[in-house]
Amino acid sequence: MLPLIRTEQLSKQFGMFWAVNRLTLEVGEGETFGLLGPNGAGKTTTVRMLSCIISPSEGSALVAGHDITRDRVEVRRSVGILTENPSLYEKLTPVENLKFFAQAYGITNESKIRARTRELLEFFGLWDRRDDKVAFFSKGMKQKLAIARAIIHDPPVLFLDEPTAGLDPEAAKLIRDMVVELTSRERHTVMLCTHRLEDAEKVCNRVMIINRGASMVVGSPDELRVKMSGNPKLEVKLVEGSDRFADRVSSLAGIRGVEQFNGKLLITADDISKATPLIVKVLVEEGGQVLGVNLLLPSLEDAYLKLIREGGAK
Ligand SMILES: Nc1ncnc2c1ncn2[C@@H]1O[C@H](COP(=O)(O)OP(=O)(O)OP(=O)(O)O)[C@@H](O)[C@H]1O
Ligand SMILES: [Mg+2]
């Protein structure tokens, strides 16, 4: 996969303080990559560097193949950014806002602007409100319009800084779903900043957890679960438990541990998915009546909170 964002030891110093500290990462074309971390972790600062709003103090980065220090104009043209405080013109309508920002990106073809505006407003369900002033919009509607604004010029790379901040759960879910649909439809490569684990888990195919400006761990949500809080466990519910069942399962190759309580077995193994069919087979052979089998994934939230606490979040 071609990396569309690549940073090497990217760093930003404010006074004596390193807000971003030697961040090295790669985001492949078409990926939705999450930067997950608590307040003050350095997410916004990273995105501001990558979209050429501020310059790095040290290190380097390429965005859509352009160097963020040397090719600033090309980088700006290649990225769309939803900032923490979406700046829309409240006295203008959605159509007027989108036209203004399209022209700011150098698009002069009026019919092209009209077609893209309609396409985006229809996608976000704002077409019927196209002639209302943005000042009368709800927060969720403004956020949808702000995302439309960020991609009016159809950039290959999209930065979304806290896209669900300040929204109620229903509006947050709607925005999350729309981001997933939109990015797969338009094939943007996305970097999404969030302190909400749920957003990172549901929207991103890969996530980097950062704290105090530095990377702590990176991987898919499933990989992070394993890396941060150990292997999944298998829960086998039996009509009636017996030490015999626990002993028999313990004797199988690759089994690390078996706990037994209330007619349930909790089993850990080197590769629990691979071991499951054999576990069920030997239990049945031993005369066990299996009621159900569940793969218990460790909670990513617990692992995340533990990591952030140990990492010394502010
Ligand atoms: N212009 C600036 N001058 C001085 N310090 C700054 C500046 N911008 C950011 N910082 C500091 O850098 C650190 C990282 O800030 P940043 O906004 O990148 O964090 P964040 O991860 O986006 O946090 P949040 O979740 O609250 O948005 C913070 O301690 C912040 O106070
Ligand atoms: Mg921020």
Image (cartoon, rainbow, N blue to C red):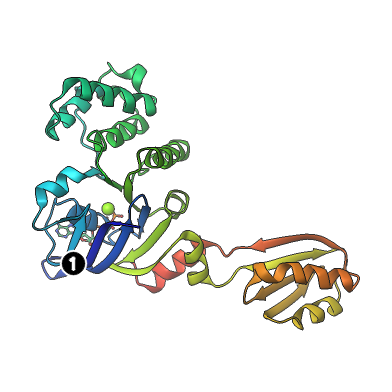
261 or 94: nearer the viewer: 94
Q: Is mark 1 within 8 Å of ligand 1?
A: no
* Quadrant holding the N terminus: bottom left
**What percent of the width, then of the height, locates residue 49?**
17, 56
74 or 17: nearer the viewer: 74
Where is residue 9, by image quadrant? bottom left
Ligand number 1: quarter of image: bottom left
**What percent of the width, then of the height, locates residue 99?**
19, 25
**What percent of the width, then of the height, locates residue 205?**
43, 54
Residue 24 vs 163, above or below: the answer is below
Where is residue 243, by image quadrant? bottom right
**What percent of the width, then of the height, locates residue 250?**
75, 81
- Binning the other alpha carbons within 10 Å of mark 1 as few (below 14), some (14 to 19) or many (20 upward) gives many
Q: Residue at x 16, y 27 (%)?
A: 100
Type of the residue with mark 1: Ser
Residue 197 vs 166, above or below: the answer is below
Q: Residue furthest front?
A: 1
Label 1, on which residue?
A: 11
Q: Residue at x 91, y 70 (%)?
A: 287
